[in-house]
Amino acid sequence: MFFLHLVALFEINNSTELLPGIKLGYKIYDSCASVTVATHVAFQLSNGEDPMIQTGHNCSNVGVVTGVIGESGSTPSIGMSCIFGPFNIPLLKRANFTQNGYHVSFDANGDPVASYDVVNWQKSESGDIELVTVGYYDASLPKGQEFHIYKNLTWLDGNTKVPVSVCSESCPPGTRKVLQKGKPICCYDCIPCPEGEISNMTDSPDCFPCPREFWPNAERDACFPKPVEFLSFDEVLSIILAVFSVSGAFLAVITGMLFYHHRTTPIVRANNSELSFLLLFSLTLCFLCSLTFIGAPSEWSCMLRHTAFGITFVLCISCVLGKTIVVLMAFKATLPGSNTMKWFGPVQQRMTVMSVTLIQVLICIIWLVVSPPFPVKNLTTYKEKIILECALGSAVGFWAVLGYIGLLAVFCFVLAVLARKLPDNFNEAKMITFSMLIFCAVWITFIPAYVSSPGKFTVAVEIFAILASSFGLILCIFAPKCFIILFQPEKNTRKYLMNKNPM
């Protein structure tokens, strides 16, 4: 700084053009980078002492302080200006010259006219960053001539006349600018927006998140509504499940028609044909209730699918339970002096089925009144899409419905196991045992699969459990009898029925 001041003084004093007839002297103080020393010198200049001014010609004269050049540091200079300011130191004010290509002048207030070097950071062939001066700006020049261009540039805007930096290319939408550490401000990296966020303008300093029900496109420069996912009827998985559902219901109806046609034969009458027809009816409803799980959830479908499933399955199990009890009572009735069948005749069987099913109906009513299932948009399982599903409402109600079905199935399974070795040519107890074994196995494996399956596959798992257990019941209990009716009619006689195996 000291050397630059001397060079400037010598240049002015030796020039006949810059300040003709005026010689500038100087007095240099060393502030030692101390604010205290700098303010002390400022007070010394301001208290009226006449300093000795060095003119550069090895002579000493008394001069007038016409201006002060501040410290190289801003803090001491600010302290000096606060001192000099009040003194108006002048600068079952008159200068106007050009030197070395730079124009120097002052306005009417003695302030220097704004002038700036226009620079551009460029990347060299070797990959290093270098500073290139491309021109300067001088506000004192006539309008339109303020810019003096040393090199040809591509301008971003003809009005602002800011040159395009070639250190880093502009960041496109979908990215944000991150300054490179230790590099000029025009050197930065373009970082892709994080998941769920976008930037929709060039050289965006930040990315911003999309609303909850929106998601960025692949370029991450716009937000679009998230796709809504549910088990719709036009999906391959839904079509397969619907085909099995309708096929199962059709199979139950055909079996019912076959039994009705042969309703007077011993094999149909052997184990309470009324319970058999009621079981086939409930199985038909079980197959069809799985269709309520397909399609977009609504308030009525969410309430219907769980309650219909719970009631129809309890109706099924209660019929199987009644058939199991009939097998046990029928065996005891054959013992000498036994009259047990009068305690579990057709009236008692109907009452058992109705009372057991009524309990499930009451559970479902309480569930629907207190906190029924309802449709909800699941935004947490997947970030990029919305799962439209049925919330359980009251989880206690849902597990109470399932728990009651499981309790009846286990009770029926235990009774069937006890009756499996009783003499019966139609193997009624054995078939009930197999059907209950399949039923319990399906629903035991359903629970972990239901909890861990995401999105629409939760519904698919529940439909699969309904269909698998329904097919297990109809095939184990009715398939052997249908086979005898159709292909072994000689066994469908009272003689064959009464020809019981010894215990």
Image: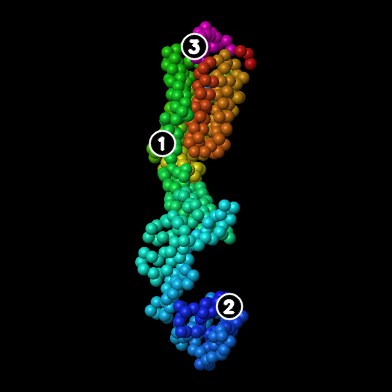
Q: Amino acid at mark 1?
A: Ala
Q: Are marks 3 and 2 in contact (CB under 8 Å)?
A: no
Q: Which secondary structure lies at badge 2? A: helix
Q: Position of residue 327 (x, y in %)?
A: 55, 21
Q: Quadrant of the C terminus?
A: top right
Q: Is residue 496 magenta?
A: yes
* Mark 1, residue position: 296
* Mark 3, residue position: 485
Say which of marks 3 and 2 sits in front.
2
Q: Amino acid at mark 2?
A: Phe
> How far is the residue under mark 3 from the one under mark 2?
120 Å
Q: Residue at x 42, y 30 (%)?
A: 234
Mark 3 Cα-neighbour bin, 10 Å: few <14, some 14–19, many ≥20 = some
> How far is the residue under mark 2 from the one under mark 1?
83 Å
Say which of marks 2 and 1 sits in front.
2
Q: Amino acid at mark 3?
A: Ile
Q: Residue at x 53, y 88 (%)?
A: 45
Is 79 situated left or right of 95 in this image? right
* Mark 2, residue position: 2
Q: Which secondary structure lies at badge 3? A: helix
Q: How many marks?
A: 3
Q: Which secondary structure lies at badge 1? A: loop
Q: Are marks 1 and 3 in contact (CB under 8 Å)?
A: no
Mark 2 Cα-neighbour bin, 10 Å: few <14, some 14–19, many ≥20 = few
The residue range painted magenta reads 481-500
Q: Is residue 460 above or below residue 55?
A: above
Q: Position of residue 420 (x, y in %)?
A: 60, 21
Q: Residue at x 44, y 55 (%)?
A: 154
Residue 173 shows up from this direction: yes
Residue positioned most to the right: 503
Q: Quadrant of the N terminus?
A: bottom right
Q: Tag 1 or tag 2, which sits nearer the N-term?
A: 2
